[in-house]
Amino acid sequence: MVQNDDIPNQMLVQPENIKEFLSSHNINSTRQRLAIAESMFRTQQHLSAENILEQVNLNGVQVSKATVYNTLRLFVKKGMLREVVIDPLRTLFDSNVSDHHHILNVQTGEIRDIDPININLPPVPGLGPNEKIEGFDLVLRVTNTTSPSD
Amino acid sequence: MVQNDDIPNQMLVQPENIKEFLSSHNINSTRQRLAIAESMFRTQQHLSAENILEQVNLNGVQVSKATVYNTLRLFVKKGMLREVVIDPLRTLFDSNVSDHHHILNVQTGEIRDIDPININLPPVPGLGPNEKIEGFDLVLRVTNTTSPSD
DNA sequence: GTTGGTGCAAAGGATTTGCATGTTC
DNA sequence: GAACATGCAAATCCTTTGCACCAAC
């Protein structure tokens, strides 16, 4: 039950800790995985495989796209990463695996995390007799009211 | 401005009405569009382009996949169809364009519509000063409590 | 015959697969 | 050297683009 009120930087893994972060999840450290993990867990963002590849390359590490995908999938399987289905064009990966929801700015395309909103769902009409609610994904669509110039 | 107050089964378009349904949305009828519209609007489902192609082919109409995609996009643009981003593998199209949300059965993969839930969102913490909530997408993840055998 | 609309083959892009290579015992 | 783990080229699959064809005037 690791839940912070101010989640911000707790999720961020310091570079020197990445090796043990991987090993604590039963993942062998390799050059490629370290580079990918560093890009992924250093900042709290929603990144595509393409984004990760760019960052890794900027750090001077040579990795193939296939490896980026396979590694991100591995991280998801190990519970270190969460897959986010918002953008129909690509899968995004979220290093925040705690319970939370998302804000999508439909103008800028920006996606941000928000703390779990305390919603008590009213009785859901269409629920089958044998179905139990496991959780819910919520995406708030927002627009800019004014030009963000001031 | 064609909009019904009680949308439920009104969305289902009878085959003989499909032509005028299209023309009322300023869409010319063609063999391909009629076939696609028939498959899409006859039943209330969430269908992928692939699904539509299968149905159209079953009805003995020859249409290319590109045309299926382009036609579905056209229908979305005209407000006849809604794009649903839930499945990371493919885009789904929902013939229910009224305000509503979705149930995803994580075991079966089934997606169903539910009526708009009357949620009053508490003040959202991470909202920017210039951002206004336009709406929200809600996906309830459900599981089967018992085997659905009885 | 020119203009605009329509359908689709081919291109493009995201993701996965299968295999070659490296590592461990 | 057998068994397993790892990385990536090539394959696959979803979706879009660009252009050929057709109809209306």
Image (spheres, coloured by chain):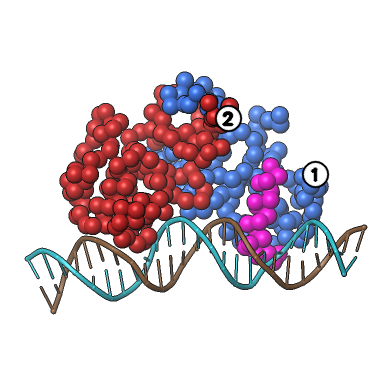
Chain colours: A blue, B red, C brown, D cyan
Answer with the quarter of the image where residue A30 lies.
bottom right
Image vertical order of residue A29 relative to residue B133, above or below: below
Residue C20 shown left or right of residue B138 in the figure: right
Q: Who is closer to the viewer here, D22 or B124?
A: D22
Question: Magenta region, mostly helix, strand or loop?
Answer: helix
Where does the magenta region start and end?
A: A61-79
Residue B147 shown left or right of residue B63 in the figure: right
Image vertical order of residue D6 relative to residue B10, above or below: below
**Label ID, residue A128:** none
Mark 2 belongs to which amino acid?
Answer: Ser
Q: Quadrant of the N terminus of chain A?
A: top right
Q: Is residue A86 magenta?
A: no
| Badge 2 and badge 1 in a common chain | no
Instruction: List x then y, in percent, for residue A92.
Output: 56, 49
Q: Is residue A76 magenta?
A: yes
Residue A25 shown left or right of residue B39 in the figure: right
Query: Which residue is denoted by mark 2 in the rendering?
Result: B147
Q: Marks 1 and 2: in contact by CB < 8 Å?
A: no
Query: Which residue is denoted by mark 1 in the rendering?
Result: A24
Assign a secondary structure to mark 1.
Answer: loop
